[in-house]
Image (cartoon, rainbow, N blue to C red):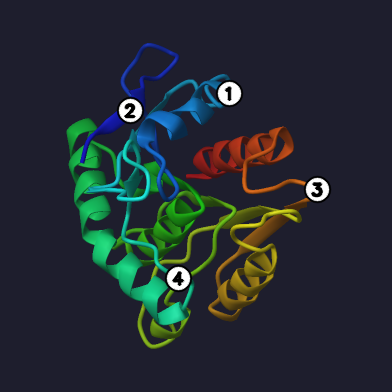
């Protein structure tokens, strides 16, 4: 996988990495646009926004983590499981390149990218510093109940006017994560559609900054 990146504002070697995972039909080029607004609070952080491995047939210039034909739980779980190895390989390569570990890593996703961020982070061999999920949901919760898994702190943000992934997905994901023993913080953005509003963006930035400060 390749994509877009933003080097640490400090100009030094990165002390942390934030991997930004885009939504269905989007790209790393779109997702990296969040990073400049986080740099002041995270000056030693490298931001990486890879393109998903598959081109999106519905949107010629976009990418997809998997072909999203519906929201049936079994289909979402299968799609996320299929796409996860590519993300893990990308993360492992970047952590090794900079001599960092999972505790120096945060995953941030939007929509389908949130599904991937949660899927990957909960199954990493080490505990990542934080996961931030915008306008997405948790897949494969039932499978996690029968295995050991990582439990990073999670922030979920969702708009009440989201016509693509209803805000009910936040409540469902929050309940499932808490049932699994994962620390979850949530924020509902009233009147916000399928996007990231300034309040949600600031909350995500602060959540990641605090997590890195603790790691």
Which residue bears the numbered disc 3?
191
Locate residue 160 relative to residue 101 in the image: left or right: right
In screen coordinates, is 23 left or right of 206?
left
Q: Which residue is mark 2?
A: 4
Q: Nearer the viewer, mark 1 or mark 4?
A: 4
Q: Nearer the viewer, residue 70 or 104?
A: 70
First in residue order: circle 2 vs circle 3: 2
State left or right for residue 111 relative to residue 197.
left
Circles 1 and 4, Cβ within 8 Å, touching? The answer is: no
Please report whichever mark, 2 or 1, sits nearer to the chain's N-terminal start.
2
- Secondary structure type for disc 1: helix
**Residue at the spot of label 4:** 70
Helix, strand or loop at label 2? It is strand
State the image coordinates of residue 188 (x, y, percent, origin top left).
Answer: 75, 54
Q: Secondary structure at mark 4?
A: loop
Report x, y in % for residue 211. Answer: 54, 44
Say which of 174 and 149 sits in front: 174
Within 10 Å of disc 4 (Cα), the crowding (few <14, some 14-19, many 20+) is few
């Amino acid at each position: 996988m390749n994509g877009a990146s933003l080097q640490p504002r400090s100009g030094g070697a990165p002390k942390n990495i934030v991997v930004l995972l885009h939504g269905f039909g989007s790209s790393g080029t779109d997702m990296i646009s969040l990073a400049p607004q986080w740099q002041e609070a995270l000056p030693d952080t490298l931001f990486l926004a890879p393109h998903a491995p598959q081109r999106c047939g519905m949107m010629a210039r976009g990418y997809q983590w998997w072909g999203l034909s519906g929201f049936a739980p079994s289909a979402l779980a299968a799609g996320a499981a299929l796409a996860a190895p590519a993300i893990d390989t990308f993360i492992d390569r970047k952590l090794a390149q900079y001599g960092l570990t999972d505790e120096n890593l945060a995953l941030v996703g939007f929509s389908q990218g949130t599904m991937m961020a949660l899927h990957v982070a909960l199954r990493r061999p080490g505990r990542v510093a934080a996961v931030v999920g915008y306008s997405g949901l948790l897949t494969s919760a039932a499978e996690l109940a029968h295995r050991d898994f990582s439990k990073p702190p999670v922030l979920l943000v969702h708009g009440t006017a989201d016509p693509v992934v209803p805000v009910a997905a936040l409540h469902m994901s929050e309940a499932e994560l808490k049932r699994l023993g994962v620390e979850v913080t949530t924020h509902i953005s009233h009147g916000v559609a399928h996007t990231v509003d300034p309040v949600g963006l600031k909350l995500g930035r602060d959540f990641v900054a605090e997590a890195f400060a603790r790691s």
